[in-house]
Image (spheres, helix red, strand yellow):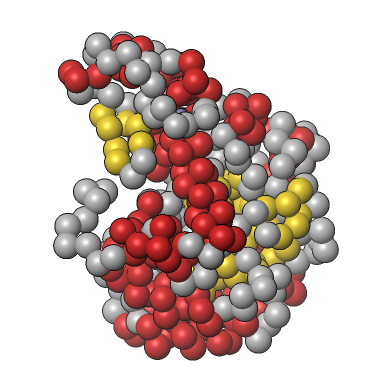
Amino acid sequence: MFFTPHGLVETPRFMPVGTLANVKTLTPAQLRDTGAQMVLSNTYHLHLQPGEAIVAGGGGLHKFMGWNGPMLTDSGGFQVFSLSEMRKITEEGVTFRSPHDGQIIKLTPEKSIEIQNTLGADVIMAFDECPPATASRQEVEQATERTYRWLERCIAAHQRDDQALFGIVQGGVYLDLRCQATEALTKLDLPGYAIGGVSVGEEPELIHKIVQATAPLLPNHKPRYLMGVGTYREMVMAIASGVDLFDCVIPTRWARHGTAMVQGDRWNLKNAKFREDFTPLDETCPCYTCQNFTRAYISHLVRSQEILAYTLLSIHNITELIRFTQKIREAILRDTFATEFAHWLAPQEVGEGE
Ligand SMILES: [Zn+2]
């Protein structure tokens, strides 16, 4: 558990993603009812649209989007490296072309922190270089070293003591680089740490190895956040290594594809078997969707491409993942995590199909 100026965050916890200062198709009241505590937003996207000056003009991120709970902004690093074309990386920062208007934009550690200081989230992230899974060892090594130098610049640029700056461990798939990076970062005594650069196309088993090598080396009295991961088994495995926080766009993205996440499975509501199924998605789920609607009704909405389908499925899917991490928290507090979640922790021969 840790505290922010906008309330506490119980750990481990799944954090919903509100890329453009909203969790797609949900009002803040609906989001609150899913059990959401900390919510993510994206510096890269908000910088491009509407721009941090407008967010600040609206009273800062919390007030602008009507969410008074804890918030976290990422640094934009991951998006610059994964989304933008024509980027150029130098020691100073990254130059890229805006996908909105073709304008040349430069993002540096100082600029990323300035934008995040202006947006005003409770937790802000260091600007990092995130090499793709295909990068060579030499490229990853250089990126990891640069990420550290950029972190020092982020710390120097950070202006607000009501915002906690988290450092990000990089190092690709090279466990020795991960360990070195972790060791260097923890000496900086930051309020929290993240494991970045996973879920960029590598095999799930490799993610587990990276997390197992890295998370236990991070201070256990500070939040440890595994960026971009939010599938059931990956979360259980990471929590077993000490990870506290997760984020992933899957629950809302799948909702918009008509997919429900139910007790570890994923269901396509377009499937004919749901057309006349008048039971809730999950009888044990307390969410608004499961309390008020049937699979048949949601299936009808999905087939008709009604926007309400995406709202109802997003409510359920986010509630489902948050509840999953809450159940793990309760099991940890009861000291029964390893036995209750043994089936998730066991080696799996076939994947979940994700
Ligand atoms: Zn539900």
Q: Is 136 or 4 nearer to us in this picture?
A: 4
In screen coordinates, is 270 left or right of 44? left
Location of residue 64 in the rendering, given as x and y in whole percent from the top left corner: 73, 34
Q: Is 277 or 167 nearer to us in this picture?
A: 277
Q: Is 45 or 302 nearer to us in this picture?
A: 302
Can residue 90 be seen by looking at this rendering?
no
Classify residue 149 by image quadrant. Answer: bottom right
Location of residue 88 in the rendering, given as x and y in whole percent from the top left corner: 44, 65
In screen coordinates, is 325 left or right of 70? left
Identify the residue at horizontal 60%, vertical 57% (top origin): 11
Q: Is 32 placed above or below 303 here? A: below
Q: Is 223 placed above or below 246 here? A: below
Location of residue 108 in the rendering, given as x and y in whole percent from the top left corner: 60, 65
Can residue 227 be seen by looking at this rendering?
yes
Identify the residue at horizontal 50%, vertical 75% (top origin): 215
Q: Is 203 placed above or below 248 here? A: below
Question: Where, quadrant-wise, is the N terminus in this rendering?
Answer: bottom right
Classify residue 218 by image quadrant. Answer: bottom right
Identify the residue at horizontal 24%, vertical 51% (top origin): 352
How many tags in the picture? 0
In screen coordinates, is 174 left or right of 222? left
Q: Is 274 or 229 nearer to us in this picture?
A: 274
Location of residue 300 in the rendering, given as x and y in whole percent from the top left corner: 31, 12
